[in-house]
Amino acid sequence: MIEYALAFAFVALAIALAMNLWRLLRGPGVGDRILALDTMVINAIGIIVLAGIADGSGTSFEAAMLLAMVGFVGTVAYCKFLLRGDIIE
Amino acid sequence: MIGNFAFAELLASALIVLGGAFALIGSWGLVRLPSLMERLHGPTKASTLGLGGMLLGSVAFFQLVEGAWTTHELLVSVFLFVTAPIAANMIAKVHLHQLKLGKTPGPAGPPAEPGPDSLWATYEAPHEGTPGCFAED
């Protein structure tokens, strides 16, 4: 039963990533692109978590944690640069 | 014991399906909604309910397979719950800033000027009296 649930969630996340990519490429503003990148990071964390469940190994959660941290720092850095013209003032 | 096993597998499967569905719905909202302020709402569902469901499903699954409660998935979830509103607030400020500069077309045009004693940090440089800005700087 869990194999079917994992297959469904993998397909759902793949479609979600494709839609994020469409929004990233289309725009129209720079805020939309930052939001699309942020959502892509969230969906990538979901795929890592699902891959950890599919493997049956708990070693991939450090990767998920690191991606959550780096994705947040990246989003804030993009926003700070656009708001203030500099990342660390 | 068999009943517990089947229940845990059912619970993990249901949580994983719920998480995947919410991630898909959030990204569909990102594509479908007309302006950035509305588009901000979609991915918040993906990050809280979607990833939260998948991470809780992972906790249930590892309890089922290894018989041990793991908590570091919950750590990822807690970190995302803390950081997602901050990231959304920063993106909204960038959007307001771009509207003000006229670089992004908005449905209602550029926003109004802030008042003389406004503390809206997006629109004005820090001055004396702004929180976090000291006179001797």
Image: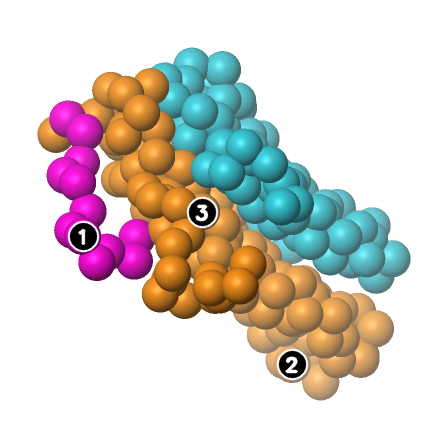
Amino acid type of the residue tagged 1 in the rendering:
Pro
Image x and y of residue B35, in percent: 25, 30
Vertical order, A39 against A24 (above or below): below
Residue lying furthest front? B136
**Res. B4 mark:** 2
State the residue position of label 3: B90
Q: Answer with mark 2 or mark 3, whichever residue precedes in sequence.
A: 2
Q: Nearer the viewer, mark 2 or mark 3?
A: 3
Q: Quadrant of residue B93?
A: top left
Image x and y of residue A85, in percent: 54, 32
| Residue shown at the point (41%, 52%) measured from the top left | B126
Pointer 2 with pointer 3, Cβ within 8 A: no
Magenta stretch encompasses residue A8: no
Q: Is residue B77 visible?
A: no
Q: Answer with mark 1 or mark 2, whichever residue precedes in sequence.
A: 2
Question: Chain drawn orange, letter?
Answer: B
**Res. B116 mark:** 1
Q: Nearer the viewer, mark 1 or mark 2?
A: 1
From the image, state the color of chain A. cyan
CA gap, disc 2 to disc 3?
45 Å
CA gap, disc 1 to disc 2?
64 Å
Of residue B134 and residue B75, the one placed in the foreground of this image is B134
Q: Chain of mark 1?
A: B
Amino acid type of the residue tagged 2 in the rendering:
Asn
Pointer 1 with pointer 2, Cβ within 8 A: no
Disc 3 residue crowd, few under 14, some 14–19, many 20+, Cα 10 Å: many
Magenta-highlighted residues: B109-120
Query: Secondary structure under badge 1?
Result: loop
Query: Secondary structure under badge 3?
Result: helix
Amino acid type of the residue tagged 3 in the rendering:
Met
| Residue shown at the point (47%, 64%) measured from the top left | B135
